[in-house]
Image (spheres, helix red, strand yellow):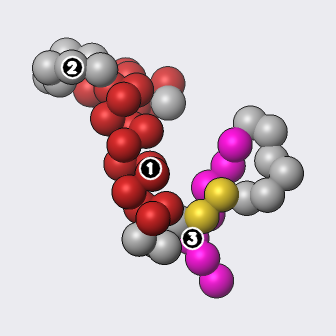
Amino acid sequence: MGEVRHQLSNNFDGSPSWYYTAVKLDLEAKGIIKRMEGSKPQKLQLPE
């Protein structure tokens, strides 16, 4: 999330964290990425 904020801070109208969350959930729903179970902090991976 830190890198997302850094990359979008100067050229983004709105909240980068909400945009990141919305995109992440959309990619999860489509099966493009998945959460790694038991990882803290949360990690994501491409499905096998």
The answer to whether the residue labelled 3 contacts the one labelled 1, judged by CB atoms less than 8 Å apart, is no
Q: Which of marks 2 and 3 is in front?
A: 2
Q: Horizontal and vertical percent for residue 8?
A: 26, 26
Residue 36 lies, in percent from the top left, at 73, 59
**Looking at the image, which is closer to me, 8 or 31?**
31
SS of the residue under disc 3: loop
Name the N-terminal-most of marks 2 and 3: 2
Task: Point out the frontmost of discs 3 and 1.
Answer: 1
- CB-based contact (under 8 Å), mark 2 and mark 3: no
Left/right placement of residue 2 relative to residue 7 reads right
Q: Which residue is drawn at 45% across and 51% down?
A: 25
> Is 47 covered by the magenta stretch?
yes
Compared with 5, 42 (above or below) is below
Give the image quarter of residue 40: top right
Magenta residue check for 29? no
Q: Where is residue 30 in the image (x, y as percent from the top left)?
A: 41, 71
Residue 22 x/y as whole percent: 36, 43
Name the amino acid type tagged 3.
Leu
Farthest residue to the front: give it.
29
Report which residue position mark 2 lands on: 14
The residue under label 3 is: 46
Q: Residues within 10 Å of mark 2 (few under 14, many from 20)?
A: few
Q: Distance between the residues labelled 1 and 2?
A: 17 Å
Asked whether the residues under the numbered discs 1 and 2 touch, taking CB atoms below 8 Å apart as contact, a structural biologist would say: no
- Circle 2 — which element? loop
- For the point 45% across and 65% down, the residue is 29
* Chain part drawn in magenta: 42-48
Magenta part, dominant SS: loop
